[in-house]
Image (cartoon, coloured by chain):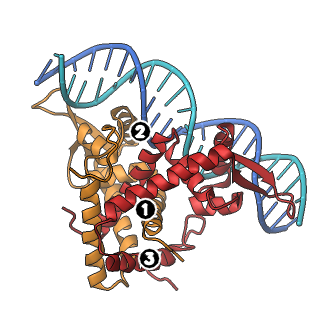
Chain colours: A red, B orange, C cyan, D blue
DNA sequence: TATTGTTATACTCTATAACTATA
DNA sequence: TATAGTTATAGAGTATAACAATA
């Protein structure tokens, strides 16, 4: 079915988006809201860190958080140490929905990959790890036109 | 850095989205337009087939094609055999930009994965292949609540 | 009747630029 | 001055429902 390695990667990317969309729809969340909630299940996160994790401009994130707050899923709290900053945390309802979304994504991906031998899973995990490390930092804000030289 | 396999898959999926965004930006395309153009580089495709490939409602696709058409990147042609249907094809400008986007995505992904041993690349490719086969068909339109039984 | 695609409508998502408040 | 976040604005993306044209 799939021919080249890069084609496989592209399709996998689409699949992951689709999974977030499908899972989000079950909880009446947009894919973006589902991703946001999944990021917050481990505890409060600041706006700046969220922009990096979601690859969004800060104003885009403001809107995303606004809508999630309006739906009663998250809350802003001022950071006591830096009064410019704020932390985004899940409300009780956000915790509930976020956990369902998080587990839903994990369950779907587990179901899809459950037949892979554990050895392969570990191998692939570390391989992906290396890929991710390679792209770290080279995101939009830096107009870096040397994609082939990691130096 | 990455702990679980599913987490790795999710991050890899986000990376692919990011690559489409970065590449698209260079050609002044939105990520969605970049994906559309990449799908059309092999030849004209009908609307219905595009909705499946992009996982969009038909009305959403109408808008996406409208905007791409307004930018002179694609053109609609009526299907002679079925006069309800139409085929979407790239304009000369769309061919140029689409090829740049397509090659840009491939180049970035190749650069990121170039250091992986060929054996791992093949393993990852076939693993993704299996994953994709598993999810095929079970998309939004069918409210199928049995994710574990491929029957 | 069913299918292909569009239109109307209402949100959501996103970026750029300008701004406020704090560091 | 620099950083954290918001506001204003404009455009793009998306889904639902109703529709037209063709099969």
| Along the viewing direction, whichever of B67 and B7 lies nearer the viewer | B7
| Along the viewing direction, whichever of A69 and D6 lies nearer the viewer | A69
**Horizontal and vertical percent position of residue A90:** 67, 50
When the figure is inspected, residue B120 is found, relative to residue A17, above or below; the finding is: below
**Horizontal and vertical percent position of residue A79:** 82, 59
Pointer 3: residues within 10 angstroms few (<14), some, or many (20+)? Answer: many
Q: Please tell me in which quadrant of the rendered image residue B13 appears.
A: bottom left
Q: Is A87 left, or right, of B117 in this rendering?
A: right
Pointer 1: residues within 10 angstroms few (<14), some, or many (20+)? Answer: many
Q: Chain of mark 2?
A: B
When the figure is inspected, residue A34 is found, relative to residue A136, above or below; the finding is: above
Q: Please tell me in which quadrant of the rendered image residue A68 appears.
A: top right
Residue positioned 31% across, 55% down in the render: B38
In three-dimensional space, the C-alpha distance between marks 3 and 2, rounded to whole angstroms, equals 34 Å
Query: Which circle marks residue B67 in the picture?
Result: 2
In three-dimensional space, the C-alpha distance between marks 1 and 2, rounded to whole angstroms, equals 26 Å
Q: Is B89 left, or right, of A71 in this rendering?
A: left
| Along the viewing direction, whichever of B110 and B65 lies nearer the viewer | B110
**Disc 3 element:** helix
Q: Chain of mark 3?
A: A
| Mark positioned earlier in the residue sequence (1 or 2) | 1
**Disc 2 element:** helix
Q: Is residue B104 visible?
A: yes
**Disc 1 element:** helix
Residue underneath mark 3: A131
**Horizontal and vertical percent position of residue A100:** 52, 49
**Horizontal and vertical percent position of residue B26:** 47, 61
Q: Is D18 left, or right, of C21 in this rendering?
A: left
Q: Is A65 left, or right, of B122 in this rendering?
A: right
Q: Are marks 3 and 2 on the same chain?
A: no
Pointer 2: residues within 10 angstroms few (<14), some, or many (20+)? Answer: some
């Amino acid at each position: 079915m799939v021919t080249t390695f890069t084609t496989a990667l592209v399709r996998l990317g689409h699949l992951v988006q689709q999974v977030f969309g499908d899972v989000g729809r079950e909880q009446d969340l947009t894919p973006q809201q589902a991703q946001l909630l999944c990021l917050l299940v481990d505890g409060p996160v600041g706006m700046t860190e969220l922009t990096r994790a979601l690859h969004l401009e800060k104003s885009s994130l403001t809107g995303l958080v606004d809508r999630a707050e309006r739906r009663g899923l998250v809350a802003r709290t001022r950071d006591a140490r830096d009064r410019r900053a704020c932390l985004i945390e899940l409300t009780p309802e956000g915790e509930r929905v976020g956990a369902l979304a998080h587990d839903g994504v994990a369950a779907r991906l587990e179901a899809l990959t459950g037949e892979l031998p554990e050895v392969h899973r570990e191998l692939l995990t570390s391989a992906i790890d290396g890929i991710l490390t390679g792209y770290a930092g080279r995101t939009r804000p830096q107009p870096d036109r040397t994609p082939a030289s990691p130096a």
